[in-house]
Image: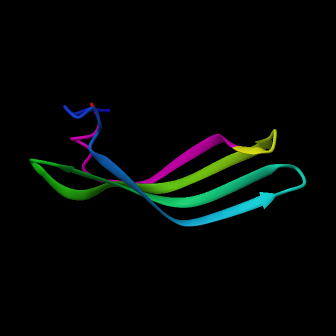
Amino acid sequence: MILYEDGTPRTHHAVSNLVVEVDEDSGVATARSCVTVFQALPELPLQPIAAGRYRDRFERGGGRWRFVERRVRVHLVGDVSGHLRV
């Protein structure tokens, strides 16, 4: 991944269509969502560079929920020349 002078890859992950399922008895929850990654650079106008899905898992312990795992599945890839070193 390429980091710029501000320390970021100059991307934004827009998450949508979030579905959360909670099993209170077992203290486990899952979430599914769609993600679109946008990037803008001085020489690259704002554009989507990737799209896919997140599958997240959470567990409750000590009365608090905590994030356990995220699986990412990328379905579409655009111009990632300003994001990844190939």
In this rendered view, identify the residue nearer to me: 29 or 37.
Answer: 29
In the image, the segment drawn in magenta is: 66-84
Q: Residue 51 appears at what percent x and percent y?
A: 41, 57
State yes or no: residue 7 in magenta: no
Residue occupying the point 26% across, 44% down: 10
Using the rendered view, name the quadrant where residue 1 is placed.
Answer: top left
Side of 22 where 73 appears, left or right? left
Q: Residue 9 appears at what percent x and percent y?
A: 29, 39
State yes or no: residue 73 in magenta: yes
Quarter of the picture holding the C terminus: top left
- From this view, report whether residue 2 is shown above or below residue 53: above
Residue occupying the point 69% across, 47% down: 57
In this rendered view, identify the residue nearer to me: 4 or 71.
Answer: 4
Q: Residue 40 appears at what percent x and percent y?
A: 20, 51
Q: Farthest residue to the left: give it.
A: 43
Q: Farthest residue to the right: give it.
A: 25
Dominant secondary structure of the magenta stretch? strand
Q: Farthest residue to the bottom: give it.
A: 17
Q: Farthest residue to the front: give it.
A: 63
Side of 17 where 42 appears, left or right? left
Q: Residue 13 appears at what percent x and percent y?
A: 40, 53
Residue occupying the point 70% across, 54% down: 30
Residue occupying the point 73% across, 62% down: 21
- From this view, report whether residue 69 is shown above or below residue 26: above
